[in-house]
Amino acid sequence: MRYALAHGRRSGRRGGAAVGEQAVRRLRDAGHEVVEVVGDTLDQVRAACGALVADGVDVLAVAGGDGLVSLGTDLCAGTGTALGILPAGTGNDNARSLGLPRDPAAAVEVLLTGTPRAVDTLHVRELDRRVLGSVCCALDARINDRANRWPRWVGPGGYTLSALVEIALLRRQPPLHYRLEVDGRPTELDALVVVAATMPYLGGGLPLAPDADPADGLLDLVVVTPVAPREAVGLLRAIRAGRHTSHHAVHLTRAREVVVHGPPDITAHGDGEPLGPLPLDVRVDAASLRVLTTG
């Protein structure tokens, strides 16, 4: 087997660099060919990994957070290269959704013995980019942006802290207005949250789309309509506990495509990383990616 294994040089002791180096040793000890990809920026890593995928490497393994997983998804979707995930980031939501182990040694064993599983991706048509877990387009996108600016030591709690800050700002901001086209059906509404998801978890372990199935050929569109700030705090608690789906402001729809028109100052985020301004057309690309999983 030919593996490419990507991680970032600047990761911490328990971050992607340490996990990646452990994986390289284990794979080589097992007799596999491994090309190690190290870069200071995602652009450097993307260029090197893209060349290896084009050359037909069997597995592209990424040791890092959801941003690096999203990069690997974009490169591997629609190719013969499987994606391997070594969770070593802050949130690790896609790994959590797929039931992958957080323990580094156990995650490396999945690279050796795991079963390739075909999963859906989200194709953002304007960018011709594939995203694995979620595309966030409202207050959720602002929360992602703020959470990305917290220092790394804050950990997954950065999403909750960012959510509380953004909720506190609601009193001073006008409602976010959206026009959604869901499988061609238009609707207009004000919203706090607009998320297209193929995976249950996002935001550092929040089960926002708890019934999302990454292999059903559909996306779960989660829309939360405006509530008062105090009620929004209670709703955040309910989301963390997975008790939000019956709330009057939470609306869940399954679809194959959603076109999101909204405020131009919103930067949509995919798997926690900035994508671009609205509008965006997000479509399910069914069974377009093979991911190594535990079974």
Image (cartoon, rainbow, N blue to C red):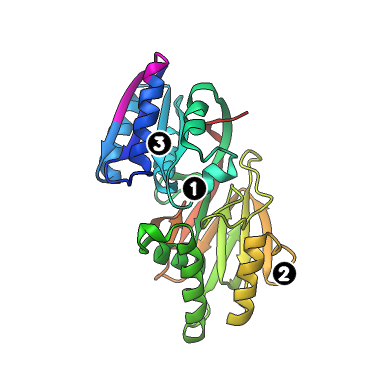
Residue 1 can be seen, yes or no: yes
**Marks 3 and 1, the one that precedes in the sequence:** 3
Task: Name the residue tied to disc 1.
Answer: 92
- Tell me what residue is drawn at x 44 percent, y 26 percent: 81
Q: Look at 34% across and 35% down and name the residue there.
A: 6
What segment is highlighted magenta in the picture? 28-36
- How far across and how far down the image is residue 60, in percent? 40, 30
User: As drawn, which residue projects farthest toward the top?
Assistant: 31
Q: Amino acid at mark 3?
A: Val
Rendered location of residue 154, percent (x, y): 41, 61
**Residue placed at 50% from the left, 33% from the top?**
107
> Which structural element holds mark 2?
loop
Question: Quick check: can you spot residue 75?
Answer: no
Judged left or right of residue 197, residue 29 is left
Q: Amino acid at mark 2?
A: His
- Which labelled disc corresponds to residue 62? 3
Whole-percent x, y for residue 229 in the image: 58, 81
Assign a secondary structure to mark 1.
Answer: loop
Mark 1 vs mark 2, CA separation in Å: 27 Å
The amino acid type, in three-letter code, at marker 1 is Asn
In the rendered image, which quarter is residue 2 located in?
Answer: top left
Residues under numbered marks 2 and 3 in contact, where contact means CB atoms less than 8 Å apart: no
First in residue order: circle 1 vs circle 2: 1
Q: Is residue 147 left or right of residue 163?
A: left
Position of residue 183 relative to residue 14, above or below, is below
* Mark 2 to mark 3 CA distance (whole Å): 37 Å
Could you tell whether 239 is left or right of 73 in the image?
Answer: right
Q: Nearer the viewer, residue 100 or 250?
A: 100
Describe the element under mark 3 as helix, strand or loop. Answer: strand
Mark 2, residue position: 247
